Structures are given as C-alpha cells and as structure tokens.
Amino acid sequence: MPDDPNLPPLRQQQETRAREELAARVEAEQQTTREFQTPEEMLRIDAARTPLPDSLEPRLAESMKATPGPKRSWWRSWLGH
Amino acid sequence: MTCPEQPAIPPPAAPTVLPDRDFAALYTAHAKPVYYLALRLLGDPTRAEDAAHDVFLKAWRSFDRFRGDSSVRTWLYRITLNHCRNLQGSWQQHHILPGSDNPLWEQAADVSDSPLQAAENHELGERIQRTLDALPPEYRELLLLVADEELSYAAAAELTGQTPDAVRGKLHRARRAFAAAFAKTA
C-alpha cells in the first residue's frame, strides 16, 4: 500500500515501519508454522533434524576393539558361505 | 533421466574410526534411525546414546549370527526395542500409564482428526517427546516404527508381535491419540 501523501513525514515513517514489522512477523510465522498430515510425517521431520552425537562412533570403536568380534564376516553369513 | 553409458561413481565413503569396514558401512546407514528410536523411547539424549552404543555393540558381537531373514534395519530395531524395553521395565513399574485398550484413549481420540499444526523450531522435539511420553508404549512404538519409511508394515507388525491388519487398526487409533495428546502440549 502506498504512503498517504497527506500524512506528516514522521507519521508516514511510523506507519511504514509498522507495516514492515507486521510483514516480517507474518513471514516468520509462515516459515516456521507447518501443517503435518500425520504424526509419522512430524516424526520424520523430527528424526531428520535430530543430530547423531559425535561421541557415539569413537566410543563404539573403542568398545569394538575391546570386544571379540564375529567369527565370520557378516556378509559371508548372510550369503550362507 | 539416467545415462547408461556413464559409469556409476560410488559416493565417497564417510571417514570412520570403526575398526571393521563392513560394520562401519552398516553403522553409517543405520546409526541415526537407531539413535532416534532410542531417544524417543527413552526420552533422554544421554540414555539414548548409551542405548545406541549398546545396540551396535550387541550387533557387532552377533554379526555372524545374523542370517538375513529380515532386513538389517529390522534386525537392529529389534535389538533396540528389546534393549529399551528392558531399560524402561523398572521405570514403568513406578510410572503406570494406561494401556492402549483403556477407554481413556478412545475418549481422547475423538478430540481431533484435523492435521497437526506446529512451529518447526527447537521446541518441536520437546513437544513430540512429551506427547510420546503420554501415550501407551504400544502406540509409541508403533508410530515410531511406521514413521520410518524404510520399514514395511509387515516388519512393523513383526517387531510389535502383531499381524499387519492389527497394525493398521491400531495405527489409526494411535494417530488420533497422538493428535489429542499433542494438542495438550501447546
């Protein structure tokens, strides 16, 4: 909406700023509020956003070194070799 | 569109510290979903990390006994479910939740069939956790398993000890119970 030329300059600035703030607020809400059709859809988004702890892999590596591993390669067992 | 003349270039392997290359590939493919399942079943990141560690260590020990009757994901989820159920056993003895056959859930399920609306921000995970914590364990497990698109209904049924038809029926009620419980977390 164009500014009203009959308004004093200060009032025009205030109205422009108010409109910009409202537009920014609406845009922010549209970006963050989302509609999920099912709980599973929501859980998938949540799962994708959930990071794996960085410490898990090195910790597992240490435990694996201290643990007797499988007797045969897993893919050999899988293929029945 | 595919171009058959162009040789397929395998994606570069992610750097790993795991001592076995085959097991490292398995870890890379399944660690995130296993951790997420444990996180939402246990509700605590530290306990979930411990559980995921133990699950993969158990998988490593029994690598040679995995016969491929089910998918690797199903196999790992079975270990995760059993592990988390054992951990929760003592907790649930002190915090009894109404089971999925309780009429309370039927009443709650009537509240909403409309889509779930939520802000996609850092609070979403907290709201989801509070919602799952309020559900009967059977509904919680079912929703988390079915949410994984790599898992079939048949696999979800197998993991929860039900028929695929029973899973479909319970899933409908679980969705409505989730929606009702989620609305209360706003």
Image (cartoon, rainbow, N blue to C red):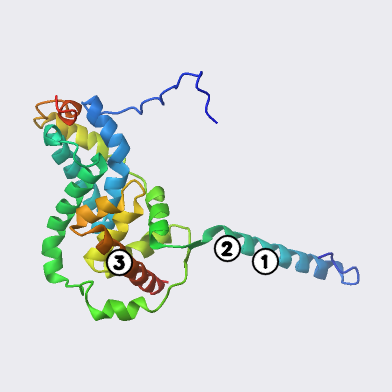
- Pinpoint the chain carrying mark 2: A
Image location of residue A71, percent across then percent down:
9, 27
- The Cα–Cα distance between marks 3 and 2, rounded to whole angstroms, is 35 Å
User: In screen coordinates, is A73 left or right of A41?
Assistant: left
Image location of residue B43, percent across then percent down:
27, 59
Secondary structure of residue under mark 1:
helix
At 33% from the left and 27% from the top, the residue drawn is B15
* Mark 2 surroundings: few (<14), some (14-19) or many (≥20) residues within 10 A: few
Identify the mark at residue B169; answer none if there is no mark: 3
Q: Which residue is mark 1?
A: A22
Secondary structure of residue under mark 2:
helix
Image location of residue A46, percent across then percent down:
39, 54
User: In which quadrant of the rendered image does the C terminus of chain B lie?
Assistant: bottom left
Secondary structure of residue under mark 3:
helix
- Pinpoint the chain carrying mark 3: B
Contact between marks 3 and 2 (CB within 8 A): the answer is no
Q: Which residue is mark 2?
A: A29
Q: Nearer the viewer, residue B77 or B184?
A: B77
